[in-house]
Image (cartoon, grey):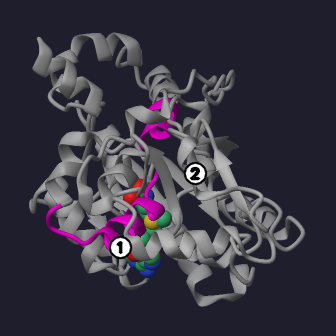
Amino acid sequence: MLYTFMDFCAGIGCWRLWLEQAWFQCIAYSEIDPKAEYTYKTFFGNKEQNFWNLMKINPDNLPDFDLLIAWFPCQTFSVMGQRKGMEDPRGQVILWIKRILQQKKTKYFILENVKGLVNHNWWKTLKDILEMLDETGYYVKRQVLNTKDYGLPQSRERIYFLWVRKDLWPFNEKLKFPMSVNQEPLENYLIENSSKHNFSKTRSETMIRYLNNKYNKWELSIDDVIKKEWCIIDTRQSDIRFYQWFSPTLRNGRHWLIYSKNGKLREISGLEWLLLQWIPYELASKIIWKLPDTDLLSQAWNAMSVNVIKAIWEIFFDFISSINPHGSYTTWLSNRKTLISEWVWSYREIEQLETR
Ligand SMILES: C[S@@+](CC[C@H](N)C(=O)[O-])C[C@H]1O[C@@H](n2cnc3c(N)ncnc32)[C@H](O)[C@@H]1O
């Protein structure tokens, strides 16, 4: 039997990428941004209905489903934003999600948000959300996880909530968040060779001026920067930061994330942004010719890190199976190798296939 889920605030569908590998089938989604919808459809096709604005959905019009995946606007909670939280109308998405849960009595519910939600408004926002969903009838496990602890070389801290309807919550519940794993080398993800992303003359000149501004005062020359191979360089107004083993959090407005390869400075490309969220190479390469890098950057910034979804899913799927016996995730995985291997997940895998 397949379980079903609805993908709310679907973005480019990172949850779906992994869940559909593991006994769950997406039956519909809701995404308000036409460009994100375009990428979603490029990845998954046109079959499922997009319900667009979540806050205009009448739950009576929704099909039944077992799992609800959602997010709610992080601009209202992010430490970068103005921290208006629940007072901002965009913060109210969570109230609509509650309405849907109440009406549909969905069994499981997964939510992700920025780490800033934890202490927003002196911890009151989080407390309100937890109380509201407790009253709606759900128990929860939550934890802040960092993408770079699960194999991918990007630092990205997000809070993850796993909610289960109270009547399904087992007495001896043993749901624990996943253990960390070793990180892969950054160079596995910085694989673009196109000259389009070489640092232009104008960019180099701006960089030289930057290194000589009143904050940096030539502490580093451009040659020093170029010598730092496979290191991501983030320039801010007052300083320059080097990330040797991992990328800083992808986000809009980081126009200056660069790195040095073979003696040249390069900008991180749209493809590399997507790979740094563990979007399979095969899928990423379907969209990079269709949208400009600026759009790919915002989509990658918004996206969930698929490696973290995989890690969470391994434990959550085992938990669900312990309630509804379907066998463990590992058993399931070994029986379904063909489906998993249909996707080539990294550029290195493609290289290996080609040299075989
Ligand atoms: C952080 S992203 C979610 C990322 C997604 N889980 C993924 O992995 O790609 C949030 C998405 O919610 C969408 N969104 C925001 N408000 C919405 C609403 N009221 N209804 C539907 N989608 C909405 C945004 O356009 C954005 O693409």
Instruction: Please check the rendered image and state whether residue 18 is part of the magenta-colored stretch, yes or no.
Output: no
Q: Is residue 4 visible?
A: no
Name the one closer to the observer, 131 or 88: 88
Quadrant location of the C terminus in the rendered image: top left
Residue drawn at the location 58% of the way across and 40% of the way down: 246
Q: Secondary structure at mark 2?
A: helix
> Which comes before the other along the chain, label 2 or label 1?
2
Would residue 309 be found to the left or right of residue 235 on screen? left
Image position, residue 114 (x, y; %): 64, 60
Residue drawn at the location 50% of the way across and 51% of the way down: 109
The residue under label 1 is 294
Image position, residue 339 (x, y; %): 17, 25
* Picture quadrant where residue 332 is located: top left
Cα separation between marks 2 and 1: 28 Å
Is most of the magenta stretch helix, strand or loop? Answer: helix
Name the one closer to the observer, 114 or 128: 114
Disc number placed over residue 78 in the picture, else none: none
Residue drawn at the location 33% of the way across and 65% of the way down: 296
Would residue 37 be found to the left or right of residue 318 on screen? left
Residue drawn at the location 76% of the way across and 63% of the way down: 126
Residue segment shown in magenta: 289-312
Q: Respond yes or no on whether mark 1 lies under 8 Å from ligand 1.
A: no
Disc number placed over residue 223 in the picture, else none: 2
